[in-house]
Amino acid sequence: MRRLLYILGLLTLVVFVVAIVGFGLVAYKGNELDAESRAFVDNAVPAIAAHWSKQELLDRATPELRENAKPERLQIMFEALSRLGRLVEYEGATGQATMTYIAGSGSTVSGSYTAKAKFEGGSAAFKIGLLRRDGHWMIHNFHVDPAGSSPAGGKGA
């Protein structure tokens, strides 16, 4: 009986140590992914908004976004946003990356960010969804709310 309790105690200790190490690695990797994805957004938004370039968006987009973004809709969206004028100040992004594992489907690394910027003609808030594939971040959702517009008045791809 004493031997059985010793083995159970040892197994419990091993599981506990493995769990602590696992949580530590996930936390470390999570912080690394947060920094990477935030840097991606902080690079992408000014590149897209500096001249309201749909090509800059498409160059950073997931294949699904490129496939679903209708050229005429993008043209209308970027023409409307260009009325904000030249980018004056990019205020940075806030958000985080998330790791998800689903048995049978594998893992997904995504990010959700908001960013703000000031333009000659007003301000805008960006809502950006990211996916990480093959070690690269890509924009999966892109939505812009010019300041002063209603929530339904935002522009998105």
Image (spheres, helix red, strand yellow):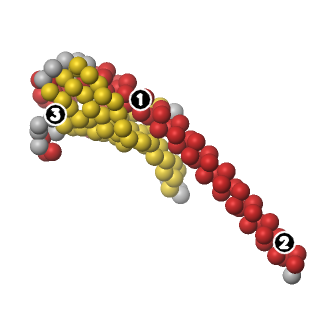
Q: Earlier in the sequence, mark 3 or mark 2?
A: 2
Q: Earlier in the sequence, mark 3 or mark 1?
A: 1
| Residue 6, label in figure | 2
**Residue 47 can be seen, yes or no:** yes
Name the amino acid type tagged 3. Pro
Nearer to us in this view, 104 or 36: 36
Give the secondary structure at mark 3: strand
Is 1 rendered above or below residue 134?
below
| Residue 146, label in figure | 3
Image quarter where the C terminus lies is: top left
Percent of width and height locating residue 91 = 30, 28
Q: Residues within 10 Å of mark 1 (few under 14, many from 20)?
A: some
State the residue at coordinates (84%, 76%).
Answer: 4
Label 1, on which residue?
A: 40
Name the amino acid type tagged 2. Tyr
Contact between labelled residues 2 and 3, with CB atoms less than 8 Å apart: no
Image quarter where the N terminus lies is: bottom right
